[in-house]
Image (cartoon, rainbow, N blue to C red):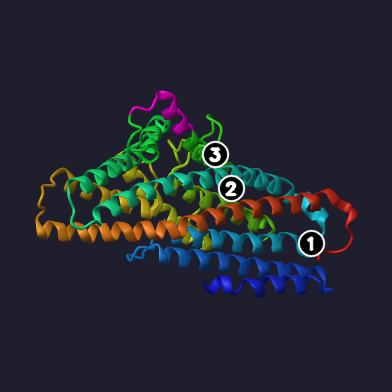
Amino acid sequence: MPATDNQGSFLNRISIRRNQVVSMDGNHEQELEDLELFQKHVADRFADLLSQSEDTLGDGLLSISWLRKLLDVFLCCEAEYKAILLLGRDPSQISKPPLDKLVPEFHDRVVKALDVCNAVSHAVETVRHYQKLAEIAVTALEQRPIGDGQVRRAKKALNSLMILLEEKEGSNHKLTERAWSFGRRSANATTSSSKDRATSASQFRSLSWSMSRGWSAAKQIQAMSSNLVAPRGGESSSPALPVYIMSTITVFVMWALVAAIPCQERNGLLTHLPVPKQLGWAHSIIALQEKIAEEWKRKKEKNRLAGLLEETQRIEKLGVSLIEFADSFQFPPDADRLEEVAVQVAELGETCKKMDEGLMPLQQQIREVFHRIVRSRTEVLDLLDQGGKVTAPIM
């Protein structure tokens, strides 16, 4: 992305200029210029994401590819935010108003973001399970000649997939047991004990639902967005502004991840984030938020709470059509209908391939965001701990 390409020069510029000996007025002018550039970079990056969200070729809004770009944007913005806040600044300034209140509030948000990253990273395993069930159906329906056995196997996998995709909040454990056991039993294990089934379900939950039972993704996002107030008056051109911008970006990114990936307890997920529309840098963020919220409301009405991930929605749509084919299947199959099904199976296979190639890097990126947040928070806390002991600008 063009804005991302400018990051290195932006960070070098801040480092060089703030280490120059200049007057206080000069410092203030430089800070204002840095703030303007930061806002421009944020606006450009999210405008690029908004443009890519309209891609109709398979990598649009909330696709795996799009989410990875969103996380790249977060990491770039976070690096620039930290440079503006810390480089060349007397640590004692962070202990004075308005930063003495805003920075701790930001740190409280990022601690909650760590929980969201953890939950989403584990929930990617659930999406991987969707993929495995879809792959079983693809393998069965690609067989030629196709017969009753292949169709029954595909239908069983797709029915298990639909059960998971249709589950409501609070019913995860029971439905996960039913679907997960399909992939783990052998042909001779149909009489396995209830203890064995409980063990299988337990193993899957340990992968996907690692948060405490009372933890709620929706409540976490709501808590992160509380007290998110734009700076006013003189604060709108002070270091308070980048703190607010980064807080807004953090809330939006975590909210988008929760909307896309089937995290624990998303009932009541916010559909509106408190971002003033008059802020130029926020226009694309607001537009993206509105598009995602509209899709969330539409899916919620249909009790499809498996997430808005584009690949998940695609396998759901194709799965419904292929189940209809399986329900009406008679041997020998109609040649025209079989040709239509072959196209759908190929599309489902391509979607599974994208998931296979993209889910692991996405999971790794989420972990990278987690560790970046931890590292940056530690750096600021160490700086605050130094307080008045530091007399020279930070290199």
N-terminal label among 1 and 2: 1
For disc 1, the marked residue is 89
Is 52 left or right of 385, judged from the image as shown?
left
View extreme (top): residue: 194
Residue 220's disc number: 3
The amino acid on which the numbered mark 1 sits, given as a three-letter code, is Arg
What residue range appears in magenta?
A: 191-202
Tell me the mark number nearer the camera, choosing from 1 and 2.
Answer: 1
Quarter of the image for residue 18 reads: bottom right
**Compared with residue 249, is residue 210 higher up or lower down, i.e. above or below?**
above
The amino acid on which the numbered mark 2 sits, given as a three-letter code, is Val
The amino acid on which the numbered mark 3 sits, given as a three-letter code, is Gln
Please check the rendered image and state whether residue 270 is part of the magenta-colored stretch, yes or no.
Answer: no
Residue beneath the point at 53% across and 47% down: 121
Residue 304 visible somewhere in the drawing:
no
N-terminal label among 3 and 2: 3
- Residue 395, percent from left and from top: 81, 66
For disc 2, the marked residue is 229
